[in-house]
Amino acid sequence: MKTIATFLSMLTVVTVMTAQSLTSLPDTLETTRQLNEVVIEAQMQHTSATVTTYYPDRNTKRTAQNAIELLDRMAIPQISINPVAGSVETPGGESVSIYIDMEQASQEEIDALRPEDVKKVEYLAFPTDPRYNHDKHVINITLNHYEYGGYAKISGTGNVMAGSGSGLAYTKMSYRRMTYDLNVTDKYSDRHNSGTEQTQVFRFPRNNDVVDEITRSNLLDYGRFRQNQLGASLRAKYASDKAMISNTVSFAAKRTPNNDSRGSLIFSNVNFENQTYSNSSNSTYIYPRWKGSYFFNLDKGFKLNILPSVLYQYTKSHRKYESKETSIMTDAIEKAVTAKLQCQLNKSFSKYHTVDINLLGIYYYNKVDYTGNTVASPVFNQFAYGGMLGYSFNKDRFYGQFIGAIAGESNEISGVRVNSIIPVFNLNVQYAINNKNSIVVTSYYNVNPVEAADKTPNYIQENELLYKTGNLYLKNTPLSSASIDYTWLPNNIFSISANSGWFQRFNRIVPVFTPDGPDGLMLRSLENNGDYQEFYVGTSLSAKLLKRSLVFKVAPRMCFEKTTGLYTDRANYLSLSLSATYYLDKFYFSAYYSTASRNLVEYSLNETSIKRKPYYRIKAGWSNGRWNLSASAVNIFRRNWVESTSSLKSVWFDQFTTEYGASSHRYVGITASYTFGFGKKVKRGDEIQTSDEGGSAIMK
């Protein structure tokens, strides 16, 4: 205990770091004639066949409060930042993985980043290095490092009129080749305008080809959502020229004491009396986790990366639905264990050729005990395995990579075992015309495994007229994609990206509604049916004007969507996002706008199309390097609480849903952070990674 206390006290030592300023001698030359001064500006962005590199300027590093804000203000054209979700995507909507010093970052690590320590930011497509874990799109943030010392950060956010906020306390200490990280986070929500309104249309066949149509509408009078999340993690890491070894232990807990709504229930059929309803639920989630990362740079061109992890999940949930004539209670206790081991070995031949072998094994055990109206105990046992062989060629301005893999899984659910084999391939070609122009062409074929919850065989009653169940015999859904991206970086002022792509999910999983449920009610089951297709074309333009004091970014995108099968539909829409940031000494001002959207849904059990409102935000802040204070006004002229509207139409059942919440309502966000560094900043360093939630098998 004395050792632990000493260690923790060292992590929280506050010392003053002396600021250093660099000056340069005048570079003018005076002889018999006075010559004009020549100023050469450093190149802030450049591209190659394998990576595009950006260097954040002083304004960006001084005013950004975390990694997402840093990326947003750098206005990188190959990525799109969603300020609502805090997510990073490609212009085509694919997820971008964020790494810090070539280690994947968690959300807590992203929030705790000290932007002042950032040296450069790299965007990579299909990178070869085994530390990137074969992610397709990667942002890698490279930091200046500490030989000894580190930094501590405390931050808090409160959203007035949105009923939410968060807090973070983080510290890092390095000594020679060791780095220690400690992180504690808390997030809360307490919202009184959350909930769902639905109109459901049921069609029941009767004798003589007569169809009885019953409309059930629940109108929301009151809703409350209250939740607290707590996370803590500790990591120890060793780094040298030949090895990088880290171990992380983390704990995450989430408590939702209230997810309640009540209102009026209206039926169109005289056999059902109009009445009131109440729907209440609460839940508790606990997730302890251990994760290791072991990278070795071996001799003779070999590189080895080993990633083991173990996650335990405990979930307890309660739901109670009541109306005048119906009472439905569902309790569930879930216990699950996920163990994962991944090994990748790379071998480089000469300067141009690299071959890599990747082996993966995953074991997943899950048991859910249902009580209440439904009494059942489905057990899920899954073992997944895979082998991948990749080859890449990199010479001068050309980079090409091909990956072929076979993945298998063996699932046992409630005594029924299903085995499947999944083929995977990726093909990626990149060419740099020069250090200002590059082209990336990618394609891949993959198969998405079925989620455990979708295979639940038991019947669970949803309301007075609807039951739901899963399907043990659902098949995995193939995915295929192809895209082309062109990047032009003419100078330090402008950066442009143009992109186009196609995506298709084959034989997707969809809900099927039939009037043959228990007691003659409607039954929602699942089956493989139809495809989802998307084609898009877009561009992104960034400009840094007035000596980089004014930054603009505009990104239009035209999308064409199509679904086939039971839910045949089409949607064509233009989306547009605009952002601007202005720096004035220690102050900064920014604005963001994104258009409304109506798009089809690739995978959902509740809707086939969804409409979302436009989002707009203005923000002002002040920063002196240690303190960073900001205030933002979001959707300030919008008084209603509607977040989205969605619909689903089928032969026997229709559903129209309105979601209410705080993300589209007007609110004011206030954020304050204080960061101080200590020690000598020289070489190694990184951030911490904490626990994330696993997937649940409880039926939604």
Image: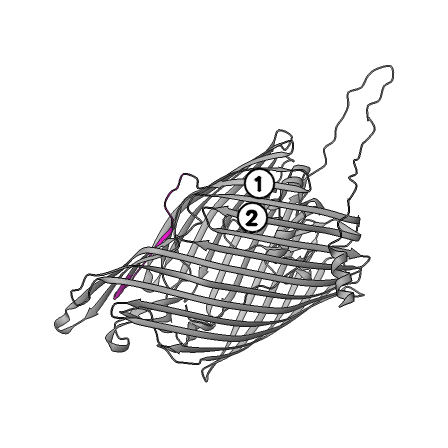
Q: Would you say the residues marked 2 and 1 are in contact, meaning their CB atoms lie under 8 Å apart? A: no
Measure the C-alpha gap from mark 2 to mark 1. 10 Å
Q: Residue 166 carries which label?
A: none
Question: For this rendering, which residue is in front, 264 or 129?
Answer: 264
Q: Where is residue 65 in the image (x, y as percent from the top left)?
A: 62, 45
First in sequence: mark 2 or mark 1? 2
Question: For this rendering, which residue is in front, 426 or 385?
Answer: 385
Q: Where is residue 87 in the image (x, y as percent from the top left)?
A: 54, 52
Label 2, residues with CA under 10 Å away: few <14, some 14-19, many ≥20: some
**For residue 548, what is the image quadrant?**
top right
In the image, the segment drawn in magenta is: 637-654
Magenta stretch: includes residue 649: yes
Return the residue at label 2: 157
Q: Regarding mark 2 in the picture, which secondary structure is present there?
A: strand
Residue 139 seen in render: no
Is 386 on the left or on the right of 698, as rendered?
Answer: right
Q: Regarding mark 1 in the picture, which secondary structure is present there?
A: strand
Say which residue appears at 79% left-offset and 41% top-offset. Answer: 18
Question: For this rendering, which residue is in front, 657 or 529?
Answer: 657
**For residue 21, what is the image quadrant?**
top right
Q: Which mark is residue 630?
A: 1
Label 1, residues with CA under 10 Å away: few <14, some 14-19, many ≥20: many
Location of the C terminus (image quadrant): bottom left
Q: What residue type is labelled 1?
A: Ser
Give above or below for 697 relative to 80. below
Say which residue appears at 33% left-offset and 61% top-offset. Answer: 567
Q: What residue type is labelled 2?
A: Thr
Question: For this rendering, which residue is in front, 375 or 413?
Answer: 375
Location of the N terminus (image quadrant): bottom right
Residue 511 seen in render: yes
